[in-house]
């Protein structure tokens, strides 16, 4: 009975560990950290803090980011995307340095010339400096990710990292 109890205990521990990893934002993936974020046009602001997307929450989506300083890469996938009728698909995406409510400078270029042709997207990885990735991981609330399209060149949807 003791052997069976150990096997059951080990199976429960493995299941709990797996559940904890899947439900959290941190993933032990070569030192990486994963963010699953809901983006909205209502979160887009200019440098003065004024809203810039009049469609607000009608433009929305979600993105998954995996920041991996050990590999010096940031991987991303846009999971879903809903834009106002007749709007162009995003042609650029970045991680910016700025707190919620204001615009800031680009620190990681996720895509531009190689913009996806459709959404949702596959996972794509881009190179980024280790120290820059570590800065984001240390203070994620100081950064945001956004997508840009022709109608909203300053940003169509945005999510603050948390």
Image (cartoon, rainbow, N blue to C red):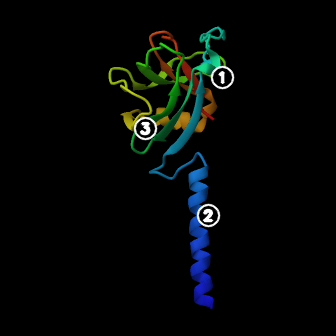
Q: Secondary structure at mark 1?
A: loop
Along the polypeptide, which appears first: circle 3 or circle 1? Answer: 3
- Quadrant for the C terminus in the image: top right
Q: Do tag 1 and tag 2 residues touch (Cβ < 8 Å)?
A: no
Would you say residue 43 is visible in this rendering?
A: no
The residue wearing badge 1 is 100
Where's residue 149, x and y in %?
A: 46, 15
The quadrant in which the N terminus is found is bottom right
Q: CA distance from mark 3 to mark 1?
A: 22 Å
Q: Mark 1 Cα within 10 Å, few/some/many (few <14, many 20+)? A: some
Coordinates of residue 102 in the picture (x, y in percent):
63, 16
Task: Evaluate if marks 2 and 3 touch, with contact meaning CB atoms under 8 Å apart.
Answer: no
Name the side, left or right, on which 138 lies relative to 92.
Answer: right
Q: What residue is shown with label 3?
A: 75
Q: Quadrant of residue 11?
A: bottom right
Q: Which residue is tagged 2?
A: 16
Q: Does residue 157 show up?
A: yes
């Amino acid at each position: 009975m003791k052997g069976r109890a150990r096997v059951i205990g080990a199976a429960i521990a493995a299941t709990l560990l797996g559940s904890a990893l899947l439900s959290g934002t941190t993933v032990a993936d070569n030192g990486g950290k994963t963010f699953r974020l809901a983006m909205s046009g209502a979160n887009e602001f200019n440098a003065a803090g004024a809203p810039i997307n009049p469609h607000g929450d009608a433009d929305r989506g979600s993105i998954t980011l995996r920041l991996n300083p050990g590999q010096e890469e940031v991987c991303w996938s846009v999971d879903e995307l809903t834009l106002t009728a007749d709007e162009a698909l995003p042609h650029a995406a970045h991680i910016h340095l700025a707190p919620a409510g204001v615009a800031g400078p680009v620190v990681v270029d996720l895509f531009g010339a190689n913009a996806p042709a459709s959404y949702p997207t596959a996972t794509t990885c881009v190179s980024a400096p280790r120290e820059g990735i570590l800065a984001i991981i240390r203070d994620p609330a100081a950064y945001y990710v956004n997508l840009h399209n022709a109608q909203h060149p300053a940003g169509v949807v945005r999510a603050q990292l948390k």
